[in-house]
Image (cartoon, coloured by chain):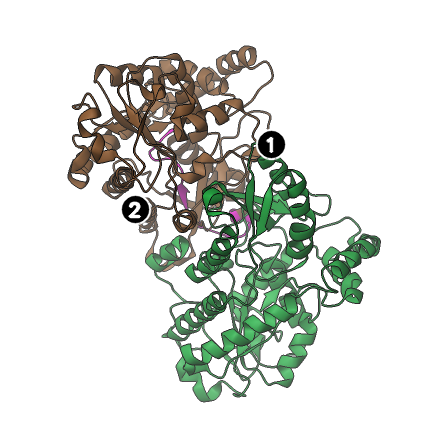
Chain colours: A green, B brown
């Protein structure tokens, strides 16, 4: 389960910020290796105070592990062909980082893994950055033989949408019935630099952004500005809906709950914040459904190791790592280096795929590849029907 | 049927451009009433040459009338309660303009009408601008007594998506079967100024923009730049998919077919352009389905005269007309001026709503309003259940 992560304890804040500002996929800075540590150091006290205010750290690891365990248990029932399943977590900026998770996966003898992004919508600055990091670490390290595939976007999955909707309904219930229909639903997501273009979203009543950093232009108007605007337009009740993160994090617990909700109350707006997905059983079931469909389609040979969409680079992309990363995941034969993927659903009990190769064999058979290890076999690039391809775009 | 329109003949080009540059909802310019005519005059020869090159004018009126007639015929079957139905066209910048259509509707004795935007996705610069114009003209003019409602967005309707998908599949068939799966689908839409935020889209493989004008920052990278980028990344086959317009227009027939496709061929890319919706029976059925559902739900009192989403102004909005327009459509009691709506499905045979008031009566009854005429009755603001509201966001 790939995500950006957050410091579980206050002392981890500095390293988290340093990793974040060092990420050229997210924030390209001039003289990055010099500037990033300086910016991280300068911002650390302020961010440490925020993590202290929300109880001494980010709960994202705890919730991700909870979701992963629940998903793995459901997967054993939903897709017994690949049972037993186990979840790992790999964060881009906080512990457990990719290296650490990789070592653990090697110790466990993992042979088959799914890189499952925990960002519902795809962006080169989020899921793309995590996959680039996995590719770099994979080239450098030695994680053993793993047959891998990637789940790179699932923001329109009905189970995910239902889980978010349930939390919005619960927040709406906190307003008096007489005025409930006059409540504005304000969706708040972490912004992206404008160069990453549009974020795929479920249709919001009004969607706004938070947490803009660095020198680039960022998308959208700030959530706090939106609240001021709504107050000016005479709105009295708002449900703030955090979207695009799968659990509570500093933006929900500090920015939304402590800063914006307070500001809104001063403006005469009564704010209720929709809960994050956290321990939502509907959401955990959605994760299991997404993984089951992926494993089933991959086994049947109707999908490749990644979605067709991930195969395509942005037309303006000049990031060489993106090209190498995509080639490697989509067509591992291009690469001889051993790769690993962290953060997954996998089968630690089976040490080799040889014994069950037939189960995964696509119609065209498999070829050996040094890219994912001597003993592993991988599928050749698939021919997916154009109808399937277009349906994929629609869903 | 509301749309921006285009000059049906070359001599209408100047007035079309003048109307476009005069629209403050689309392009706010300093000294607009002085600058807009100058810009329009300067650009006229170039754009006239483009309309000459595509056969002497825009086909948008012909196609919209074709679609409207087909829809009305289907509506007579699908929703006989409001038959007979008739379609009108009102363009924002070209003939037939709102004034002309209004006069025609008054002559026909229209009593019930639906303002049906032909922009699938909502933006304040497109559908919003058309509704603002209708509001302004309605306040000033005298179009008789019309009970109206609004269909303001339908970009996720499965019939619309299916119609677009069919045209993409047909374009893909033109490539050899052996290389078909390596074809990039490049979606191209008319851009929007960045201040309008995100456009709701169906998930594209890659979406790019065209036709940026004026001094504001516009969204996205240009289609021509995207084609150059794809060529650099080694792509050899592209299907260009015009999205967000319901028929051919100058951007498809001139920019895509004559300019970009030519450029792409010089770059070594084989381009096929997906057909526009034009006379697609699947699309016309989708329009009829959207209108049927709207009429049925409105009659049953489960929706108001507009969608809930249209009721909400953008939090940063400072355009006074937007506020008045929304109040008037959502709650006509606020306004005493006679309003009319152009471009519609309606019932010209019935001169008064009195005789069939019960059919439309919502649970709470109706009140008289001068806003839509002495003899007309309108529904009070509805209380829509919160579940409905959330479902509306999801769909």
Q: Residue at x 46, y 62 (%)?
A: A307
**Image side of residue B208 versus residue B56, left or right:** right
Vertical comparison of A347 with A317: above or below = below
Q: Nearer the viewer, residue A88 or B362?
A: B362
Instruction: Label 1, secondary structure: give it.
Output: helix
Q: Nearer the viewer, residue B15 or B122?
A: B122
Between circles 2 and 1, the one closer to the viewer is: 1
Residue B159 is tagged as 2
Q: Nearer the viewer, residue B65 or B40?
A: B65
Q: Residues within 10 Å of mark 1 (few under 14, many from 20)?
A: some
**Residue B30 located within the stretch drawn in magenta:** no
Q: Residues within 10 Å of mark 2 (few under 14, many from 20)?
A: many
Instruction: Label 2, secondary structure: give it.
Output: helix
Could you tell me if residue B96 is visible in this image? yes
Q: Residue A136's spot in the image, x, y percent?
A: 66, 67
Q: Quadrant of residue B95?
A: top left
Task: Name the subunit of mark 1.
Answer: A
**Residue B238 located within the stretch drawn in magenta:** yes
Vertical comparison of A344 with A283: above or below = below
Q: Nearer the viewer, residue B238 or A84?
A: A84
Q: How many marks?
A: 2
Q: Residue at x 45, y 56 (%)?
A: A156
Q: Quadrant of residue A308?
A: bottom left
Task: Name the subunit of mark 2.
Answer: B
- The N terminus of chain B: image quadrant: top left
Q: Residue at x 60, y 68 (%)?
A: A63
Callouts 2 and 1 close, C-beta under 8 Å: no
Q: Which residues are magenta?
A: B230-250
Which residue does the numbered mark 1 point to in the structure image? A232
Q: Residue A116's spot in the image, x, y percent?
A: 54, 67
């Amino acid at each position: 389960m790939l995500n950006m992560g957050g410091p579980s304890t206050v002392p981890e804040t500095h390293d988290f910020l340093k990793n974040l500002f060092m990420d050229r996929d997210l924030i390209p800075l001039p003289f990055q290796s010099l500037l990033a540590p300086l910016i991280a150091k300068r911002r650390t006290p302020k961010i440490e105070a925020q993590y202290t205010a929300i109880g001494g750290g980010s709960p994202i690891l705890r919730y991700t592990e909870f979701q992963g365990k629940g998903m793995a248990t459901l997967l054993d029932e939903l897709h017994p062909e690949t049972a037993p399943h186990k979840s790992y977590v790999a964060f881009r900026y906080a512990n457990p980082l990719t290296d650490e998770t990789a070592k653990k996966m090697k110790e466990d003898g993992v042979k088959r893994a799914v890189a499952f992004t925990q960002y519902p919508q795809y962006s080169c600055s989020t899921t793309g950055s995590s996959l680039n990091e996995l590719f770099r670490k994979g080239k450098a390290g030695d994680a053993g033989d793993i047959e891998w595939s990637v789940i790179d976007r699932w923001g329109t999955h009905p189970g995910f949408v239902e889980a978010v909707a349930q939390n919005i309904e619960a927040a709406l219930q906190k307003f008096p019935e007489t005025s409930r229909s006059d409540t504005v639903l304000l969706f708040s997501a972490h912004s992206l630099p404008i160069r990453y273009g549009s974020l795929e979203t479920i249709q919001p009543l009004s969607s706004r952004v938070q947490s803009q950093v660095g020198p680039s232009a960022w998308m959208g108007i700030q959530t706090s500005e939106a609240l001021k605007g709504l107050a000016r337009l005479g709105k009295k009740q708002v449900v703030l809906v955090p979207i695009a993160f799968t659990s509570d994090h500093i933006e929900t617990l500090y920015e939304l709950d402590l800063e914006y909700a307070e500001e809104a109350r001063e403006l005469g707006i009564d704010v209720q914040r929709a809960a994050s997905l956290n321990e939502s059983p509907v959401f955990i079931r959605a994760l299991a459904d997404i993984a089951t469909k992926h494993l089933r389609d991959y086994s049947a040979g109707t999908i490749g190791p990644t979605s067709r969409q991930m195969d395509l680079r942005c037309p303006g992309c000049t990031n060489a790592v993106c090209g190498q990363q995509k080639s490697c995941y989509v067509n591992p034969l291009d690469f001889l280096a051993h790769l690993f993927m962290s953060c997954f659903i996998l089968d630690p009990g089976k040490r080799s795929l040889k014994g069950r190769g037939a189960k995964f064999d696509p119609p065209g058979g498999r070829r050996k590849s040094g890219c994912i290890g001597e003993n592993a076999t991988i599928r050749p690039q698939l021919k997916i029907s154009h109808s399937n391809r277009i349906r994929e775009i629609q869903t």
